[in-house]
Every structure is written in structure tokens, then in C-alpha cells.
Image (cartoon, rainbow, N blue to C red):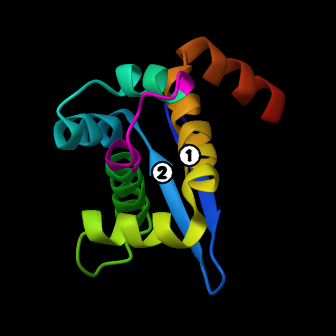
Amino acid sequence: MSGARGEGIIELDERQVAILFTNRALAQAEKGMGKSVLGVVGDLGNGQAGIGDVAHLLQAGMEAARRDARAGGRPVTLDDAFEVLDQAGFSATVTAVVGAMAAVISYSREDGEDRAEKNG
């Protein structure tokens, strides 16, 4: 699928955790955090974002990846996200989350057309 979409993988000892961000997933994260994703990205850049913010972003990304994979099962909880955060560590989690989010935040239709031309 083309469009505003950013994917990432968080490596754990026993498994890989897929994350996916779309505009819908980012809106879900905003709802959970009660603040804008762009504000949180700025806060991450200046060291003001909290661990809870990262966990909410991670939860939204994990849930979007679960739905996209049509894996079934129960929805990803905030506790699930904290478990991954605990295992992977803050820095590795932030790197994966921000990288995947950046693809969505910076996306423009013209970029997608350029990629299609290069791949076609």
C-alpha cells in the first residue's frame, strides 16, 4: 500500500515487534496522550517527552501493525507497549517509533509519485 505509511521493527531477544504508523494510528496516539503528535515529536527532540508518551505512541504503532497483518487476537494494550519498552529500552524504542512516524509526518503525494516512478 502506498501513501502516508511508516513501518519499523523493534528487536527483542525472543521476537520482533512490528510497528506501523498511518495518519489514523497517529490520531489514535493523540487521543491516548491527550496532546498532538507533532508536539510530542518536538518534546522528544528537546528531552521533554515522557516515557508515557512513548508508550502511547508504541501502543498505537503496534496496534496498527496487528490490524494491518490481520493477525487477529486481542487489541494491543498500553501494558503490552510498556512490556516492549522495558525489554527493548527507551532509546531503541524511540529510534524505531520516531523513524516510522517521520515517514508519515513528512509524506506528500508528490513523494509517493516519485517513488512509484522509480519503482515502475
Q: Examine the rendered structure and indicate whether residue 42 appears above or below residue 97.
A: above
The magenta-colored residue range is 45-54
Report the residue marked by disc 2. Answer: 20
Q: Examine the rendered structure and indicate whether residue 84 appears above or below residue 65.
A: below
Q: Examine the rendered structure and indicate whether residue 115 appears above or below residue 32.
A: above
Q: Is residue 5 visible?
A: yes
Residue at 56%, 54% (x, y): give it.
93
> Is 96 on the left-hand or right-hand side of 81?
right
Q: Position of residue 60 (x, y in %)?
A: 33, 51
Report the residue marked by disc 1. Answer: 94
Q: Position of residue 94 (x, y in %)?
A: 56, 46
Residue at 41%, 60% (x, y): give it.
62
Give the amino acid at mark 1: Val
Q: Quadrant of the C terminus?
A: top right
Q: Observer-nearest residue: 52 or 71?
A: 52
C-alpha span from label 1 to label 2: 14 Å
Q: Nearer the viewer, mark 1 or mark 2?
A: 1
Residue at 51%, 38% (x, y): give it.
5
Residue at 25%, 34% (x, y): give it.
30
> Is 33 on the left-hand or right-hand side of 96?
left
Q: Secondary structure at mark 1?
A: helix
Q: Is residue 120 visible?
A: no
Of callouts 1 and 2, which one flags the residue occurring earlier in the amino acid sequence? 2
Give the amino acid at mark 2: Leu
Q: Position of residue 71 (x, y in %)?
A: 38, 77
Q: Secondary structure at mark 2?
A: strand
- Residue 84 shown in magenta: no
Which quadrant of the figure has residue 40?
Answer: top left
